[in-house]
Amino acid sequence: MSKKNALSIILMIWLCGSLFALPTLLYSKTLSYRYAKREIRTLCIMIWPDGVAGQSSSDNIYNILFLLLTYVVPIISMVFTYTLIARVLWGHKGIGEFTEFQKESIRSKRKIVRMLMVVVAIFAICWLPYHLYFLYTYKFPEVVHFPFIQHIYLGIYWLAMSNSMYNWMIYCWMNKRY
């Protein structure tokens, strides 16, 4: 891939990410609520043109698009590209007997394939609860008023954001060169 193509792809990714974040910039508001013990909390919520988050069809469409573009498409693209890589690494069929060096090389390549599978699985595990939370709270909006739902959401949010720290751990754990 040429440097120009790589820069074009990077620019396109940043542009798409910025455009996808635009509704959050446009429709997020802070509101103060008084709770049971006269405690006042300031919340950041999305107020769409057709209602608040969780009740707005715009919010539901946004969350479905968000799920597709940030979860389904990446998983499909990782599975597709890693499958191509795996076919090349795993599929070596030699003629005759293998030397110890060749056997070790094949074992090493197969470990890389397993490592790629773990990377995809960890991504799926970390991000699925985050996306399901928003789909679930749209279908059952009363959930957002449950006690400790903020703590549950923060745990789910932490799990999703923590995904980026696991890759190096997986690489170190599954590759002796690190």
Image (cartoon, grey):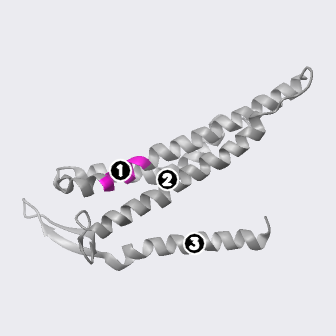
Looking at the picture, tell me which residue is in the foreground, 124 or 174.
Answer: 124
Tally of numbered tags: 3
Against 172, is 20 above or below? below
Against 36, is 97 above or below? above
Q: For mark 3, what is the residue?
A: 14
Q: Which quarter of the figure is the N terminus placed in?
A: bottom right
**37 left or right, relative to 122:** left
Q: For mark 1, what is the residue?
A: 132
Task: Please tell me the numbered disc located at residue 72.
Answer: 2
Principal secondary structure, stretch drawn in magenta:
helix
Disc nearer the start of the sequence (1/2): 2
- Specify few, some or many for label 1: CA neighbours under 10 Å numbering under 14, 14-19, or 20 or more: some
Q: For marks 1 and 2, give the CA distance.
A: 12 Å
- Element under disc 2: helix
Q: For marks 3 and 1, give the CA distance.
A: 25 Å
Amino acid at pointer 3: Trp
Q: Please report the residue visible at 75 percent of the width from the left and 34 percent of the height from the top.
A: 90
- Element under disc 1: helix
- Element under disc 3: helix
Amino acid at pointer 2: Val
Q: Please report the residue visible at 27 percent of the width from the left and 78 percent of the height from the top.
A: 49
**Residue 132 drawn in magenta:** yes
Q: Is residue 175 visible?
A: no
Task: Please tell me the numbered disc located at residue 80.
Answer: none
Looking at the picture, tell me which residue is in the foreground, 101 or 175.
Answer: 101
Q: Which numbered disc, 1 or 2, marks the residue closer to the eye? A: 2
Q: Are marks 3 and 2 in contact (CB under 8 Å)?
A: no
**Residue 55 drawn in magenta:** no
In the image, which residues are magenta? 128-135
Disc nearer the start of the sequence (3/1): 3
Q: Please report the residue visible at 60 percent of the width from the left and 39 percent of the height from the top.
A: 117
